[in-house]
Each structure stands twice: as C-alpha cells, then as structure tokens.
C-alpha cells in the first residue's frame, strides 16, 4: 500500500511540476520560438529527472530486497541454532530425570529389602521370646503343682 502511495506521489509531483512549468512559460512574455525552446528544455529536464528517480528507486528497491533476504536468512539461522540448543538441553534434562528416577527406584527397592530382612529378624526374636516365656510358664506351672 505504501509503495503505491509513494509512486502516486512521485508521479503527481512530476506531472504537477510539468504543468506548473508549462503554465509559467505560457504566461511569460516570450516569442513562440523561445517559448518552444524553453518547453523542450523543461520537458527534457523533467524526463531526465524522471529516469534518474526511476533508476534510484530501482537501485534502492534492490538494495532493500537484498538486505531483507540477508536479515531473514540470519534470523532464520539464529532461530534454528537457538531451537537446537533448547532441544539439546531438553533432551539432556529428560535423560537426567530418567536416570534419577531409575536410581531412586533402585534405592527404594534396596531399602525395602533391608527393612523386610530386619522385620523378619525382629519377628523371629519375638517368636523365640514367646517360646521361651511359654516354656518358663510351663516349668513354673509344673513346679507349682508339685
């Protein structure tokens, strides 16, 4: 949209300049030959300036186009690199979490096995003490009967 506005403005300025110059020449007190020469000079000057503006506009357009392509390529490459770093860190973090989970699971299993063994030992001691107490009660009961 702004390209069209700029183009329209330039065309309007050129046409306006030509019309204004023509009106000034036509109202100036000169002979026909002088007037035609002045009009031709002004038309040639306007044509040359129009070509100059066109060439400058094309050059600038090409420069901006190249610059935009370069910058978009740079930004694209930077984004790819950043995404690669993020993906790599994410992968390493996931691997580390998986390793920690496995280590924790193994530690919990070891603790449970140790506690299970300790519980069995404690249960065996309780059973032995109950047996000893029962035997002692049986001996005491037998002595009381005598």
Image (spheres, rainbow, N blue to C red):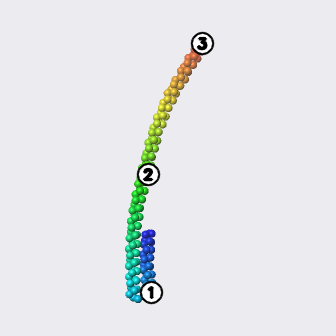
Spatial distance from mark 3 to mark 1, Cα to Cα? 156 Å
Seen at 48% across and 32% down, the residue is 110
Q: Secondary structure at mark 3?
A: helix
Contact between labelled residues 1 and 2, with CB atoms less than 8 Å apart = no
How far is the residue under mark 3 from the one under mark 2?
Answer: 90 Å
Which quadrant is home to the N terminus?
bottom left
Residue 6 position, x and y percent, is 44, 71
- Residue 82 badge: 2
Which residue is more in the foreground, 85 or 137?
A: 85
Which residue does the image show at 40% across and 78% down from the upper left? Answer: 45
Give the numbered dot on residue 101.
none
In this view of the protein, which residue sits in the foreground, 130 or 41? 41
Q: Residues within 10 Å of mark 1 (few under 14, many from 20)?
A: few
Identify the residue position indicated by label 3 in the image.
143
Q: Quadrant of residue 51?
A: bottom left
Mark 3 crowdedness (10 Å alpha carbons): few <14, some 14-19, many ≥20:
few
Mark 2 falls on what kind of element? Answer: helix
* In the rendered image, the vertical position of residue 141 relative to residue 78, given as above or below: above
Q: Is residue 89 above or below residue 137?
A: below
Q: Spatial distance from mark 2 to mark 1, Cα to Cα?
A: 70 Å
| Nearer-N-terminus badge (2/1) | 1
Relative to 138, 33 lies left or right: left
**On the picture, is 42 further left or further right than 142?**
left
Q: Position of residue 114 (x, y in %)?
A: 49, 29
Circle 1 — which element? loop
Q: Is residue 127 left or right of residue 9?
A: right
- In front of the other: 128 or 5: 5
Residue 28 marker: 1
């Amino acid at each position: 949209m702004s390209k069209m506005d700029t183009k329209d403005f330039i065309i309007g300025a050129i046409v306006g300049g030509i019309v204004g110059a023509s009106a000034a020449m036509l109202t100036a007190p000169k002979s026909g030959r002088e007037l035609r020469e002045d009009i031709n000079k002004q038309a040639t000057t306007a044509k040359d300036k129009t070509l100059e503006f066109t060439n400058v506009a094309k050059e600038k357009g090409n420069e901006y186009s190249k610059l935009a392509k370069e910058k978009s390529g740079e930004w694209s490459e930077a984004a790819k690199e950043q995404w690669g770093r993020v993906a790599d860190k994410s992968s390493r973090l996931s691997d580390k979490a998986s390793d920690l989970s496995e280590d924790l699971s193994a530690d919990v299993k070891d603790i449970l096995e140790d506690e299970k063994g300790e519980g069995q030992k404690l249960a065996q001691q309780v059973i032995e003490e109950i047996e000893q107490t029962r035997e002692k009660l049986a001996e005491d009961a037998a002595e009381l009967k005598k």
